[in-house]
Image (cartoon, grey):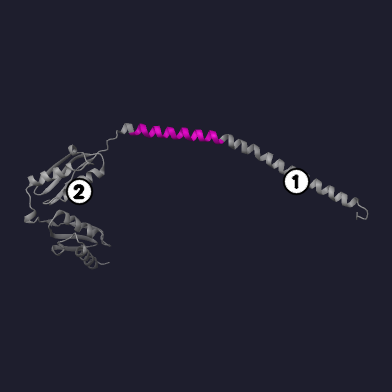
Amino acid sequence: MTDFELKREVESELNWDPEVKSAAAIGVSVKDGIVTLRGHVDSFIEKLAAENAVTHVRGVKAVVNELEVRILKSSERTDEDLARAAVEAIAWLTEVPEDRIKIKVENGIITLFGTVYWNYQKQSAENAVRGLMGVKGVINLIEVRPSADKALVKAKIEEALKRNAELDAKSASQLRPLALRSSCAAPFARGRSERKQNAWLGKRLDHVRAERSQPGAKA
C-alpha cells in the first residue's frame, strides 16, 4: 500500500469513527507508513479516539499525534476547578488507594504522581480523569511498586521447590515396589507360558503315538 492510499484509508477511518466528531478539522500526512495527525479537536478524549482509530488501520506503522485540544467555551474550567474534579474522581475509585495519588493541574493538563501496587491501578487513575470536562491532556507519572518483599518472595519460591522435591521423592518410593513386582512377575509369566506349551506338546505326542499303535496304522 502506498502512502497516498494509506492516507485515504486513515481519513476514511476518522470520518467513520463516531467518537471523532472533529474529523474535518484533522489533517493527515503519511510518510513511510508513519501517520501524523495535525489540527484541533474539542476534547482530550476525542484526541485519544482519533489516535486509537488510526492505529487500527492496516498498514500504519506508527502514529504521531500533534492534535491540539481546544476546549469549547461552554466546557472551559479553571485549573482549580479541574483539580477539585480530579481529586473527586480519584476518590470514587475503590481499587485505587486515594492517599497514594497526587494531582497537579496546569493549563488544563493533569499530571498524576504517586505509587500503586499494580499497573491496573495506575491505568484506572488515568481513565478516571482523562474524561473530565475541560481536560486538555493527562501525564501519568504514577509508579508501580509491588508490595511483596523480595526476601519473602524468595523464601516462598524455595519452600515451593522443596515441597515439590519431597512430593517427587514420595511418588518415586511408591512406584519402586510396583516396578519390582512387575519385574518378578515377568519371568513367572514366561515360565507359566512355557509350561502350558510343553503340556500341549506332550498331549499332542501322546495322541500321535496312540494313532500309530492302532492296527493297520502306517509306520
78 or 152: nearer the eye? 78
Q: Which residues are magenta?
A: 153-175
Question: Residue 31: horizontal and vertical position, in percent?
Answer: 21, 63
- In the rendered image, residue 164 lying in the magenta stretch gets the answer yes
Q: Quadrant of the N terminus?
A: bottom left
- Badge 1 local density, few (<14 within 10 Å), some, or many (20+)? few
Is 16 placed above or below 85 here?
below
Q: Which residue is mark 1?
A: 197
Q: Assign a secondary structure to mark 1.
A: helix
Q: Residue at x 50, y 33 (%)?
A: 170
Label ID, residue 77: none
Q: Is residue 177 left or right of residue 110?
A: right
Is residue 120 depicted above or below 4 in this figure?
Answer: above
Magenta: main secondary structure equals helix
| Residue 96 among those drawn in magenta | no
Alpha carbon separation for disc pair 1 and 2? 83 Å
